[in-house]
Amino acid sequence: MTRITQAVVMLLFGGAIIRSTVTDTFLRYVKEGLRPFLLGAGILLVTAAIMTIWYDLRAARSRSSDPARGSSEPVHSSSLAAHGASELVHGASEAARGSSEPVHGSSRPAHDEHGHDDGHGHGSHEPRVGWLLLAPVMALLLLSPPALGSFAAGQSGSVGPAAASDYPPLPDGDPVEVGLMDYAGRAVFDGGKSLTGRNVKLRGFITPGPDGKPMLARMVLACCAADGRPIKIGLAGAPIDAPPDAWVDVVGVYSPQVGTDPVNQAQLAYLDVRSWQEIDEPKQPYA
């Protein structure tokens, strides 16, 4: 690829990164805290591409405005004579070979417009495979992939809840909204002491459990979607008939039941469901 073609690809790629960052599409790939770094990288790519294109166009204009050098250079008769003699000798040798070898067009190697020869009469060409670099750029511009859902949750073991020496009281509110990781830690390691007597609301998507019953899950990212792992909460009490991958708000109370994830043997907290409501996927689907 020429340098200006590479600059165009870089310009499109940088623009795609900026667009995904501004429109929150990047949240399907990485954590929200990486927004400023992505935005900065996109701006740098666009700036570098614009400067490269500007430099190449300016250089092209400078070359086209230069006068021809041929008339300004002296002609050396000795050089011309030597060149002519060389051509005559070459022509004589070609004529001598003509009677013994079949003629297939010109015997001189073909050159492209830049004077490069590949040994088979074909000039060199730019590697067109370089244009395949546009494929991920166009995908980033035109497609918005779904967030990791029930399939990924079913293939990975649940993230174990974090143990803590002291769990502070839940904030005011009825019900009080609690993250899945926070609820699991309080339920498994604190024995539900800080959850007793409180109505809590959990938000996540439905994923089938090992027994076929629905569970509540949310993907937890360390950095990006490639390292995403689920945090799963078992559901008891009122039945939930939402399909897999449906996002729901579930209101319930602490359940002393504790299960085990068959994938990695992690302990699973349970919620005694009182009510639930299907919702749209949140802007930030990952925990």
Image (spheres, helix red, strand yellow):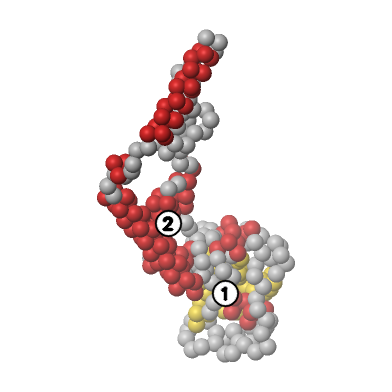
From the viewer's perspective, is residue 23 above or below residue 77? below
Where does residue 145 sit, x and y in percent of width and height? 47, 56
Contact, mark 1 vs mark 2 (Cβ under 8 Å): no
| Count of marks, rendered view | 2
Does residue 224 lie above or below 134 as drawn?
below
Residue where numbered disc 2 is placed: 10
Return the x and y of residue 241 as percentages of the image width and height: 52, 61
Q: Is residue 259 above or below residue 86?
A: below
Q: Nearer the viewer, residue 40 or 188?
A: 40
> Seen in the image, is 68 located left or right of residue 127?
left
What amino acid type should be assigned to the residue bearing mark 2? Answer: Met
Which amino acid, by three-letter code, is at mark 1? Leu
User: Who is closer to the viewer here, 200 or 166?
Assistant: 166
Q: Secondary structure at mark 2?
A: helix
Q: CA distance from mark 1 to mark 2?
A: 40 Å
Furthest residue in direction top, as rendered = 99
Q: Which residue is tagged 1?
A: 180
Q: Nearer the viewer, residue 15 or 59?
A: 59
Instruction: Point out the image quarter for the C terminus.
Output: bottom right
Q: Position of residue 86 (x, y in %)?
A: 47, 27
In this view, which residue lies farthest toward the front? 78
Q: Residue at x 69, y 65 (%)?
A: 261
x, y percentage for residue 234? 62, 69
